[in-house]
Image (cartoon, rainbow, N blue to C red):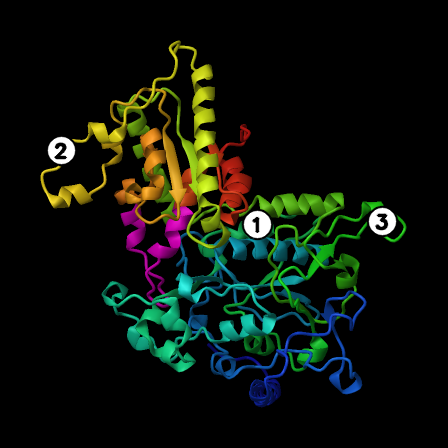
Amino acid sequence: MVNTTPPSQRRNTLVIAILGIIFFMAVAHLELVPFLEFNLETHNSGVGSQVNPKSSSSVSTPLSPSLSESETENVSPNNEEHLQSEGNKEHNPFLTMFPERPPGDQELFLGYVPHSGFHNQRIELQNALRLAAYLNRTLLLPPLFSCAKFMNIGWDRPSVLLAKWGDLTREYSQSCRNLDPAQLAPMTWDEYRVMTPEEREQDCRVYHSWTLTPWTYVFDIQRVIQGVVGIGGQTEPMRVFDRPNATIAWMAEHLGITDLDKEVYWLNGTTRWDFQILDDSEADYDLHPEARPNPRRYSQELPLSNLKARPERVIHFGSFFGSDRLKASTQAHVELQQYIDTSLDIWNQKILDATELVEAQIEKWRVLTARAAPGFLGAHLRTEDGGFKTYAEQNLELLTLWVRNMTNLDQQALTNITSPIQQPVPAQAQLPPNTNEQQEQEPPTFLDRCMGQPPESPLVYLATDIHHPRLSPFLVNFLNEFPCTMVLSDFPESVQLLDGIHNTVDNIHMLPFLIALLDANLAAYGRQFHGTDVSTFSLYISHHLWPEYHPSSTLL
């Protein structure tokens, strides 16, 4: 790719990078306060910083991020030469669908640092799209980061998040590209955390544990930004500027920024819930405090009017996670919120094809097993991490009660069935005796369990993070009470459809990162859905996918 940046600008960028490296090394040696944690009282908003360090003694840390050594080595991402000028569903889905272009002379931007899992990153994306529209700024659109659990970039201070993004490089590990990850020993968190950056960079297990894809791999972002015209008073499409990584080095080079302190307004929270953006567009909160939304978990409020008044080329956040991070109060902003929050449909063709295969198989099984109710019930049970592990028993009990209730409602609705609901036949009683140890280790299939059950026994699709759910002791009682429960492993043809997908940029096997999306899409097709409380996975299904697939229905 031809670099069109003027030589003088490139020299300035190099000087910034060198000075940043020197300073970063000095800070690390002296163990000073992390370089992005600003004094929150240096500006009226309480969360931003735009103070010259030479003229202020109240801030002991630099006002803009330094360029780390890994960032200066990776200013041009590996797949940059593959960027397409125009895309559609037939183009390579692993390449951006937005044309590479120089920034406009007067163009203003909005940026943030993505973190955590898919749905947390999705919420950050929704917030950023909304705020970019509110402020009439161009969104610096980062990629979707997918990884194994041990590599997860969880919430942290902006300095730490940016450093981790700077470490995402494959410069010295191209020899790993064509290795089969199935032949490599598994990597554990304890092993990964003690490795040096150099060791991680050269370890093929690390290479095959993460990948970057454009958001257009999952969502039709082009349709979202074009379709906003006419909504909430929008007269033109939203603007995005493709950002192949979330590093400061890339931003400095590609936006032509020569002074990070003066041209970027940094909003860097030091806790997870530091600030909430207050929509004060049409409300005088000083005169009418009763109109102010309750910040609840947020410690500070940042008026939207303050952000609108910022003259800097870039307004840059650290984390932008939180479903209520950006409150909409005006009618126009509420309409924009509703539009964006309901526009991120799964459009990855392979996932849609796999979903269609499962739907067809479920309907065949429904007829074959003589289920009385139409369709199936969708459910999501999250149990494997954090607080979800603590409340797993409680969430399973809530799911059990919900299925029982739905079964009773079905019984009332099916006027052709007059007898009370029969008790399901214990699934184990239907299985033939096993003759060898191998058979004893194999779980019964869906048809083994469901055939012969009373017609009222509900057909349930359970999306879950439990590995091998049919063998899980935790689910034994649930599966025995509802033997016509289906899980993703019951549909090997659909899983196989995703198994052959590799990212064309880095050759990463995509199946581990697509399974959850397929699971969510299938659960959303249930005629009713029950999720796990506070799970972003469940919320995406109940608040977006399910209403999209059942526009004339209401969740019970």
To which residue does mark 1 refer?
224
Distance between the Cα atoms at labels 1 and 2? 56 Å
Q: Do the residues labelled 1 and 2 touch (CB within 8 Å)?
A: no
Is residue 545 placed above or below 133 in the rendered structure? above
Which amino acid, by three-letter code, is at mark 2? Pro
Which residue is tagged 2?
433
Q: Which of 457 and 135 is in front in this view?
A: 457
Q: Residue at 32%, 51% (x, y): give it.
A: 498
* 255 displayed left or right of 213: right
Label drawn at residue 252: none
Q: Do the residues labelled 2 and 3 touch (CB within 8 Å)?
A: no
Quarter occupied by residue 271: bottom right
Q: Decide which of 530, 103 is in the foreground and name it.
A: 530
- Image coordinates of residue 494 in percent, x first then y, are 30, 44
Earlier in the chain: of badge 1 and badge 2, it is 1
Give the magenta-colored segment's residue range. 495-518
Q: Nearer the viewer, residue 1 or 60?
A: 60
User: Which mark is in front, 1 or 3?
Assistant: 3
Q: What mark, if any, has residue 289 been given in the picture?
A: 3
Amino acid carrying mark 3 in the image: Pro
